[in-house]
Image (cartoon, rainbow, N blue to C red):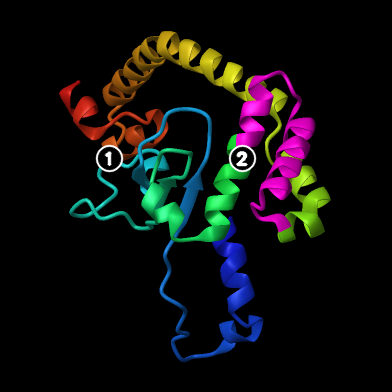
Amino acid sequence: MYISKTYEAIVDTKAIYKEKLLKIPKPLFVVLYNGAKPYPAEKTLKLSDAFMDTAGLFEEDSPLLELKVKVLNINEGHNTEKVKKCKELAGYVKLVGKARRYMQKGFNQTDAMAQAVKDCIKEGVLAEFLKKHSVEVITMFAQEFDIDIAKEVWQEEAREDGLKEGMEKGVEKTQLKSAKAMLEKNLPIDLIIEITGLPRARIEAL
């Protein structure tokens, strides 16, 4: 979604009517990770990892649509040399680190960031920027990550994982039963694959 918005800003809307190939800047997609959970110093995420039903879809393991994103862990103690090269990024890491420590002490998100902003201004970290934009920074921090909503989502995911594990066996049993009945009626294998979602090899084995 970020990428489409970026290209919308770069590309003139009239350009879609041109017959000539439209050249666009070479992309490099980076995520700066500063979450609380342990994460590698560097990792590459691929859009194709999220695709469903990929069996037999790609030729020579080449996805029809791909996007690679480099994730850099910028938490304190990670990628220190890279962070040091950008004064603003180093200041941001320090700001978030302070806010997180205040939250660990029992502060709510807004109060934790407000206190972190005060500390950074006092210490000369992003001082000029924070003096002008402290309200926006505090508001953004509160809006961007709602811990209560996050907890709800995490609980839902945990329930889904538990249900999925128990249901998968039952679902597969039903799929196999349906596939067998369709084979007995001499329905084409391609149609059975489409209806049941089972891989070709599984159906052929029946």
Residue holding disc 1 = 55
Judged left or right of residue 97, residue 122 is: right
Q: Earlier in the sequence, mark 1 or mark 2?
A: 1
For residue 39, which quarter of the picture? Answer: top left
Q: Quadrant of the C terminus?
A: top left
Name the residue located 45 percent from the left edge and 15 percent from the top edge: 164
Reply above or below: 124 against 141: below
Q: Quick check: is 112 in the magenta stretch?
A: yes
In the image, which disc is placed on residue 96?
Answer: 2
Predominant secondary structure in magenta? Answer: helix
Tag 2, which secondary structure? helix
Q: Examine the rendered structure and indicate whether residue 143 appears above or below residue 147.
A: below
* Residue nearest the viewer, comparing 168 with 177: 168
Q: Is residue 47 visible?
A: no
Q: CA distance from mark 1 to mark 2?
A: 42 Å
* Residue drawn at point x = 55 percent, y = 45 percent: 93
Secondary structure under tag 1 reads loop
1 and 2 marks in contact (CB < 8 Å): no
Q: Which residues fall within the magenta stretch? A: 98-127
Q: Tell me the amino acid under the disc marked 1.
A: Ala
Q: Nearer the viewer, residue 128 or 197?
A: 128
Q: Is residue 6 left or right of residue 85?
A: right
Q: Is residue 204 above or below residue 170?
A: below
Residue 55 visible in rendering: yes
